Every structure is written in structure tokens, then in C-alpha cells.
């Protein structure tokens, strides 16, 4: 079907009143004068029409699991937690284990994690897993500890004074729990989770996304790949494994995602050059030696794969750069650093020189930036250089935008709003630059800039129709979402 859409259209970094002629899923013509009466018209006269949003970093399985298993992000005390766990014990008895997402220590009035013995009082014959909101700390009950670790004590387990595990796990032990639950989730629940995640992102105007999925013992990327044609949106899979041959054999053009170079600031595991402001005994963890990282990055690059790795702290970012400097010339494969939160001028210059793509999540600043919040607590004066978008763009570094959902909501309007209202005023960027993060730049970040990310003749008719622009707030009505010319979401 051929039809016209009328509205304030985002073209060449400006909004102009005009018409888009949509034909066979593409933008076939753009008119600025009178409409052509030969075509049916969808009139969004008072609305803004932008390219469909592209989120460059979503944990697609975990986002969907949040709609299936309990979300703890709104609880404020340990008693609330125990109530939610007791409810789940009654209502979710058919699942092989109980898992809870988004526990946020910052919001808990007791300012501590639950102890495994407290959890045992509610659930003692099934594995119970509580995940901290940043994904870098886990709490288990005693049954879970026995089942997953078989009485062994490994690195990252917090111990009490009798040298027994408290049930609080970080680092390697935390990683092991993530692997356990993903490996043991039945395939049908994974597919259900992907579908739930898709529903969620469409309502937020997302028409394309980078899905960070799987890990060494979790083949979720294969399940998603097998079902790719059943989704309405376009999904670019980042298989988060280090097995280069396997990735090649499955036909992927890229590897990685949140392959951890370091941990997170919230869990004191992001690797910093200087110790943590509020915990001077540590400066974080590097998960790879230089040599291991060199072997992995060099081989993946040789095999023609685009690489994405997770690096948050300056020391982790510095390690990735140091390794790339040994062999990378033009970065024609567009290797990316995901997060890249704690920077300095020297690192920025090196990123520029290596032509690395920076995959940022502006909503991190919304939640953790500014006076008295997480970044300041952990980093002190170093907040001068957290997520320095202005400084990065001034060097013409390609910045792609994402949410890291479910860590922050998969909402590009929030991302755009956060980038232009950066708590550090010197690092704010303009509305148009912020829109680019979630459209044009994100398309470039996965080699799709020749058919996506802009409203242009011949491009996919992926569009989002907004009531207002996200400059002063982000609670904005999304009137409609088009994917290849089909309406996949609309409200009256
Ligand atoms: Zn990550
Ligand atoms: Zn991530």
C-alpha cells in the first residue's frame, strides 16, 4: 500500500512541515508543498516525526524476564523484600528456581543486603537468586549456594567471621550465578521473555535494537537467531561469548556486548586508576590479563568480526585501548567500547586516534550523576569526567546511545533528555546531537547507516511520532510507531 504521512519531519537536523510518501516499506518521496491527492493521508499535522529509535545496548533476555519474574526496583526495605519473596514462593512454584531482579541497595532503608539465613526462613528447598540492579552483586539462599557451588568457596564470595559464605556474591562468584540461571532456564521461557521485551521496547518508539545475549554456557543468542523472523522490530544480535569459531559458524558479523573487562561502580568492581572515594581499599577488578585480552581482540579482528566489550572504569578503558594500540590501524570494523563511563582527556585522545565507537547510556547520568548520587560517592572529584559527551563529540568521536536495559528503562526519550540535561553542565549536548545518538549514530554503530537512522529517500520507513520533543521532560506521548511502513504501535 502507498500512503502519505503529514507532520513536522526531522530532516537534515531540522524539523520541517512536509509529507512522506511511503511505498513498500520505504520512504519513497519527501514533499514540502501541497499534498498529492492521489494517496491516502495519515495526518500528524501537530506532531514531530523522527526516525524510529535505535537502542544500541539492551539485555534483551533479562529485560523480558523482568516482565515474568518479580521486579524489586520499587521496594524500600528488607521487609518489603521478604514479602515479595514469600508471594513468589506461593505463586511461581512451577519455575525451576526463583529469581528476583533490580534489588537496589541505595533504596533500601537498612542499607544492607539480606543474609542467606533470613532468606532460608522463607525458601529453603529451592534455589533463590536476588540480583542487584547493576547485575554485579547477587544474593543466594543456603540451598542455592549448595546447588550452584557445591560447598566450594570461590573468589567473590563474601565470608562471615567463621569463614562461611554470607550468600552475598560479587566478581567471579556473581558471574557463576548468572551463568547458572541462564543455562537452566527452559527455551520456551526464553522465547516468552524475548517477546515480552519486544512489546516493552516498541511502546518506547524503538524499531531497531542491539540485543546483548548469551554467554559461554547460555546459547540464548542461538534461540533468538532461530526466531528472528518472528519479531516485528529489527534485532541485531551481539553474542556475548569468546568462542570466535562458533560465532563465525553461526554467521554472526560481530562478537561481544557486555563481555566484562571490569565490573561496575556500584559494586566497587569497575577498574579505576585510583582507589574508590568511599572504599579506599579497592580500585576494582580487571577480568582479563593484557595477554588474554590481546589474544581475544586480535583474533576476533583478524576474523573480520566487529567487537564490543564492557569497560566502565578508566583503568579498564585504558587496558582495552592499550591492547588495540598494539595492532589496530583504521578500525574499519567499528569496534566499540560499551559504557566507557570514567574517562580523562588522555583516554579521549586515544579513543579518537584509534577511531573507536563509544556506546553510551545517558540515563546513567540521570540516575547516578550529580550531587550526592552514586558517581560522586564512588568517584569524588572524578565526576568531572564521567560520561563526558560534549568532550567526546568535540573530538568527533562516534557516540551511539542505548539504555543497558533493564539497568535503565529502554526509553530513548529518557536517554535523549538525560544527555541534554547532563548534571555536569559542561558535558551537555544539544537536542539534535542527543537525537542522533539514538538514530543516525546508532545505525552507524551496526553498519546500518545506509538504510536507517535518518528520514531520507530510499530509507526504511521506520518512524516514531511524538507529541513533543524531550527537551524539558521525557514523559511524552508516543502517538505512533512505524516499522517498514506498518504501524506497530499507536494511541488515540
Ligand atoms: Zn555492561
Ligand atoms: Zn550491558
Image (spheres, rainbow, N blue to C red):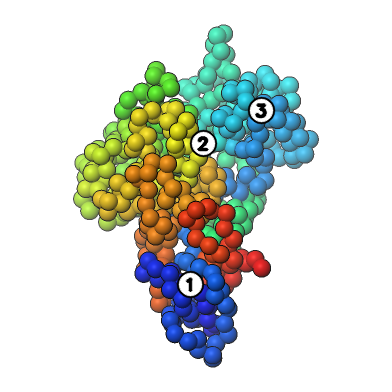
**Which residue does the image show at 32% across and 54% down from the upper left?**
398
The disc label shown at residue 77, or none = 3
Task: Give x and y (percent) for residue 471.
Answer: 47, 55
Would residue 487 be found to the left or right of residue 367 on screen?
right
Which marked residue is nearer to the observer: mark 1 or mark 2?
1
Between discs 2 and 3, the one toward the N terminus: 3
How far apart are the two marked residues, 2 and 3, measured between alpha carbons?
A: 18 Å
Q: Position of residue 266 (x, y in %)?
A: 48, 31
User: Is residue 301 among the parts visible in the rendering?
Assistant: no
Q: How far apart are marks 1 and 2 (CA)?
A: 38 Å
Secondary element at image label 2: loop
The residue sitting at 37% across, 34% down in the picture is: 383
Secondary element at tag 1: strand
The earlier-in-sequence mark between 1 and 3 is 1
Disc 1: which residue = 8
Q: Is residue 435 above or below residue 174?
A: below
Q: In which quarter of the image is residue 486?
A: bottom right
Local packing at callout 1 (Cα closer than 10 Å; few below 14, some 14-19, many 20+) is many
Label 2 vs label 3, nearer the camera: 3
Q: Mark 2 points at which residue?
A: 134
- Which residue is rendered at x = 21% and y = 50% of the image? 329
Whether residue 427 is visible: yes
Residue 168 placement (x, y as % from top left): 56, 23
**Which is more toward the observer, 392 or 423?**
423
Q: Which quarter of the rendering shows the N terminus?
A: bottom right
In the image, residue 160 sits, relative to residue 97, either above or below, namely above
The CB of the residue at mark 2 lies under 8 Å from ligand 1: no
- Whether the residues at callouts 2 and 3 have beta carbons within 8 Å, the answer is no
Contact? badges 1 and 2 (CB < 8 Å): no
Left or right: residue 329 compared with residue 189: left
Of the numbered discs 1 and 2, the one sitting upstream in the chain is 1
* Residue positioned 22% across, 53% down in the render: 330
Amino acid at each position: 500500500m502507498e500512503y502519505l504521512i503529514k507532520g513536522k519531519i526531522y530532516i537534515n537536523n531540522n524539523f520541517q512541515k512536509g509529507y512522506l510518501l511511503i511505498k513498500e516499506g520505504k520512504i519513497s518521496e519527501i514533499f514540502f508543498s501541497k499534498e498529492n491527492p492521489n494517496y491516502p493521508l495519515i495526518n500528524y499535522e501537530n506532531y514531530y516525526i523522527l526516525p524510529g529509535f535505535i537502542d544500541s545496548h539492551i539485555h534483551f533476555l533479562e529485560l523480558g524476564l523482568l516482565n515474568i519474574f518479580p521486579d524489586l526496583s520499587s521496594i524500600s526495605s528488607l521487609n518489603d523484600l521478604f514479602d515479595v519473596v514469600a508471594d513468589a514462593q506461593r505463586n511461581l512454584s512451577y519455575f525451576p528456581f526463583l529469581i528476583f531482579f533490580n534489588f537496589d541497595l541505595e533504596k533500601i532503608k537498612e542499607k544492607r543486603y539480606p543474609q542467606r539465613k533470613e532468606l532460608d526462613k522463607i525458601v529453603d528447598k529451592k534455589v533463590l537468586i536476588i540480583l542487584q540492579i547493576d547485575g554485579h552483586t547477587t544474593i543466594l539462599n543456603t540451598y542455592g549456594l549448595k546447588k550452584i557451588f557445591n560447598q566450594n568457596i570461590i573468589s567473590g564470595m563474601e565470608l562471615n567471621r567463621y569463614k562461611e559464605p554470607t550468600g552475598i556474591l560479587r566478581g567471579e562468584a556473581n558471574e557463576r550465578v548468572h551463568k547458572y540461571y541462564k543455562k537452566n532456564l527452559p527455551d520456551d521461557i526464553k522465547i516468552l521473555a524475548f517477546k515480552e521485551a519486544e512489546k516493552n521496547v516498541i511502546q518506547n518508539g524503538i524499531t531497531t535494537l542491539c540485543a546483548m545475549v548469551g554467554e559461554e554456557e547460555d546459547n540464548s543468542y542461538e534461540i533468538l537467531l532461530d526466531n528472528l523472523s518472528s519479531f516485528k522490530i529489527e534485532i541485531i544480535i551481539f553474542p556475548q561469548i569468546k568462542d570466535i569459531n562458533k560465532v563465525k559458524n553461526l554467521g554472526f558479523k560481530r562478537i561481544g556486548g557486555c563481555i566484562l573487562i571490569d565490573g561496575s561502580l556500584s559494586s566497587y568492581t569497575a577498574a579505576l586508576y585510583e582507589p574508590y572515594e568511599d572504599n579506599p581499599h579497592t580500585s576494582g577488578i580487571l577480568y582479563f590479563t593484557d595477554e588474554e585480552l590481546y589474544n581475544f581482540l586480535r583474533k576476533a579482528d583478524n576474523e573480520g568480526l566487529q567487537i564490543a566489550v564492557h569497560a566502565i572504569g578508566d583503568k579498564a578503558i585504558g587496558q582495552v585501548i592499550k591492547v588495540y594500540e598494539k595492532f589496530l590501524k583504521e578500525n574499519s570494523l567499528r569496534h566499540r567500547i560499551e559504557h566507557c563511563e570514567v574517562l580523562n582527556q588522555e583516554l579521549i585522545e586515544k579513543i579518537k586516534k584509534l577511531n573507536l565507537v563509544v556506546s553510551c547510556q545517558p540515563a546513567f547520568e540521570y540516575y547516578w550523576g550529580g550531587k550526592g548520587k552514586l558517581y560522586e560517592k564512588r568517584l569524588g572529584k572524578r565526576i568531572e569526567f564521567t560520561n563526558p559527551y560534549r568532550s567526546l563529540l568535540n573530538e568527533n568521536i562516534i557516540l551511539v546511545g542505548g539504555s543497558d536495559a533493564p539497568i535503565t528503562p529502554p526509553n530513548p526519550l529518557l536517554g535523549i533528555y538525560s544527555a541534554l540535561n547532563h548534571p555536569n553542565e559542561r558535558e551537555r549536548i544539544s537536542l539534535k546531537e542527543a537525537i542522533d545518538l539514538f538514530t543516525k549514530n546508532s545505525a552507524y554503530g551496526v553498519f546500518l547507516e545506509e538504510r536507517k537512522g535518518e528520514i531520507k529517500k530510499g530509507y526504511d520507513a521506520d518512524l516514531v511520532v511524538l507529541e513533543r520533543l524531550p527537551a524539558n521532560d521525557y514523559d511524552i506521548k508516543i502517538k505512533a510507531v512505524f516499522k517498514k511502513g506498518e504501524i506497530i504501535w499507536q494511541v488515540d
